[in-house]
Image (cartoon, rainbow, N blue to C red):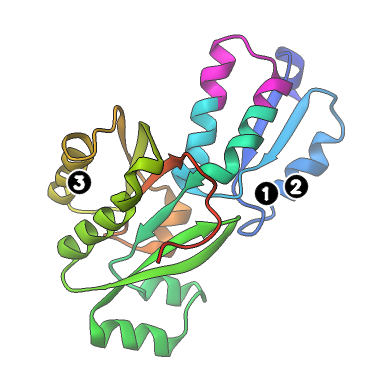
Amino acid sequence: KKYSAEYDGVVHINISSDFSSCYQNALQAAQNFDNVYVIDSKNLSTGSGHLVYTAASMAKEGYSADEIRTAVENMIPFVDASFVLDTLDYLYKGGRCSGLELLGAKVLKIKPSIEVVKGSMKVGKKYRGGLEQCIFRYVSDRMSDIDNIDKSRIFLTHCNCSQEIVAKVGSSLKKDFNFDNVIVTEAGCTISSHCGPGCLGVLYIRKNEKTSIQV
């Protein structure tokens, strides 16, 4: 109500409706206002952050809330968000994986990647070995389609990962893959509580729509 009264319009970008009821709640609340636009990001963490970044940039340039809403909604299918996990302990505690999967990952030293596809989380490639080795293989796999990636901006998001590993990945994204802007962020409490320490992801914008997990 406060922002609706103070500004020409409000653009509210939510975590994917598959992960939370935030979108439905915001949509219901927005029915009381003519200038509030609610967007289901169909993503999470800095996957949604890409949309916020674009919306904020457009607002500074003087675009209307309706124009921003349209641009952001058109951008959603092109956001590529994924993470690699050091442990499944936290997914297990949150009820998102079974005890058998947890045991298998520990015995085989598997570090799975999680991808967001059309608003839902999917298990992607599984890596074996030490965390640093697995992270660099994960990054290499994500960058294997570099010609179809917008290099203007990439988020490097992690949860209490080694600063040495974060620095190495950030340097590689700049020097080896020529990203203009590498934005390093720490995951928020919701993502961190589900993914656990050591989790790291690279999140970027594709030139073509993301329709499936990487194989």
| Magenta span main SS | helix
Q: Amino acid at mark 3?
A: Val
Marks 2,1: beta carbons within 8 A = yes
Residue occupying the point 16% across, 42% down: 167
| First along the sequence among labels 1 and 3 | 1
The residue wearing badge 2 is 25
Q: CA distance from mark 2 to mark 1?
A: 5 Å
Q: Residue at x 49, y 72 (%)?
A: 94
Say which quadrant the C terminus sits in. Answer: bottom left
- Give the image location of residue 71, x and y in percent: 63, 28
Q: Does 168 lie within the magenta span?
A: no
Corner quadrant of residue 84: bottom left
Q: How many marks?
A: 3
Q: Is any atom of residue 201 visible in this view?
A: no
Which residue is disc 3 drawn over? 169
Q: Amino acid at mark 1?
A: Cys
The quarter holding residue 180 reads top left
